[in-house]
Image (spheres, rainbow, N blue to C red):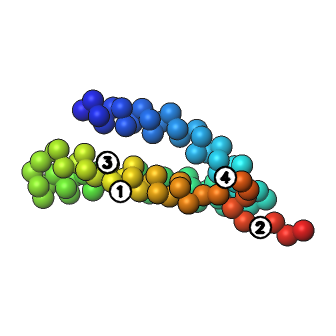
């Protein structure tokens, strides 16, 4: 439980930064970039409890959900690693 609390704290502490990056990198298309990021988070938040319930139902072990949490955070790390922080996501016409 302590690890889940630490992971949740880190996720919530960095949440505001994710919104700021979406706004900064969106350029003239900030609305669709921000909306896509926000909707992806909403879909994930809606599906994750079902995934946890399915994993616990299949394995009977709550400890396996830690691997699910770790995989989720590892996947988000990979996604952030592919962003180029030196400019907007899209080329702006001159």
Separation of marks 4 and 2 at Cα, in angstroms: 14 Å
Residue underneath mark 3: 69
Identify the secondary structure beneath mark 3: helix
The answer to whether the residue labelled 4 contacts the one labelled 1, judged by CB atoms less than 8 Å apart, is no
Residue placed under numbered mark 2 in the picture: 91
**Residue at screen point 50% across, 33% down:** 13
Point out the frontmost of discs 3 and 4.
4
Mark 1 or 3: in front is: 3
Give the vertical position of 12 relative to 88 (above or below). Answer: above
Answer few, some or many: residues within 10 Å of disc 1's Cα (few below 14, many 20 plus, some between 14 and 19).
Answer: few
- The Cα atoms of the two marked residues, 3 and 4, are separated by 26 Å
Secondary structure under the numbered disc 2 in the rendered image: loop
Q: Tell me residue 28's x, y (percent).
A: 79, 59
- In x, y percent, where is residue 72? 37, 53
Residue marked by disc 4: 85
N-terminal of the pair, mark 3 or mark 2, is 3
Instruction: Pick out the residue farthest to the left.
Output: 60
Report the Cα–Cα distance between label 3 and label 2.
35 Å
Is 93 rendered above or below residue 23?
below
21 horizontally vs 40: left or right: right
Counting residues from the start of the chain, the first of labels 4 and 1 encountered is: 1
Q: Which mark is residue 47?
A: 1
Where residue 39 appears, as percent x and y from the top left, is 53, 56
N-terminal-most mark, 3 or 4: 3
In this rendering, which labeled residue sits more in front, label 4 or label 2? 4
Of 63 and 34, which appears nearest the observer? 63
Residue 38 as seen in the image, left or right of residue 42: right
From the top left corner, tell me how far across and down residue 31 is, in percent.
70, 56
Q: Which element type, helix, strand or loop, lies under badge 1?
A: helix
- Identify which residue is drawn at 18% across, 49% down: 64
Marks 1 and 3, how far apart in space? Answer: 13 Å
């Amino acid at each position: 439980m302590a690890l889940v609390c630490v992971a949740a704290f880190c996720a919530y502490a960095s949440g505001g930064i994710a919104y700021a990056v979406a706004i900064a990198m969106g350029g003239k298309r900030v609305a669709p970039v921000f909306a896509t990021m926000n909707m992806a988070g909403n879909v994930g938040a809606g599906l994750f409890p079902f995934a946890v319930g399915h994993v616990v139902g299949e394995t009977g072990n709550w400890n396996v959900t830690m691997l699910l949490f770790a995989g989720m955070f590892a996947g988000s790390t990979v996604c952030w690693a592919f962003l180029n922080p030196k400019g907007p996501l899209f080329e702006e016409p001159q």
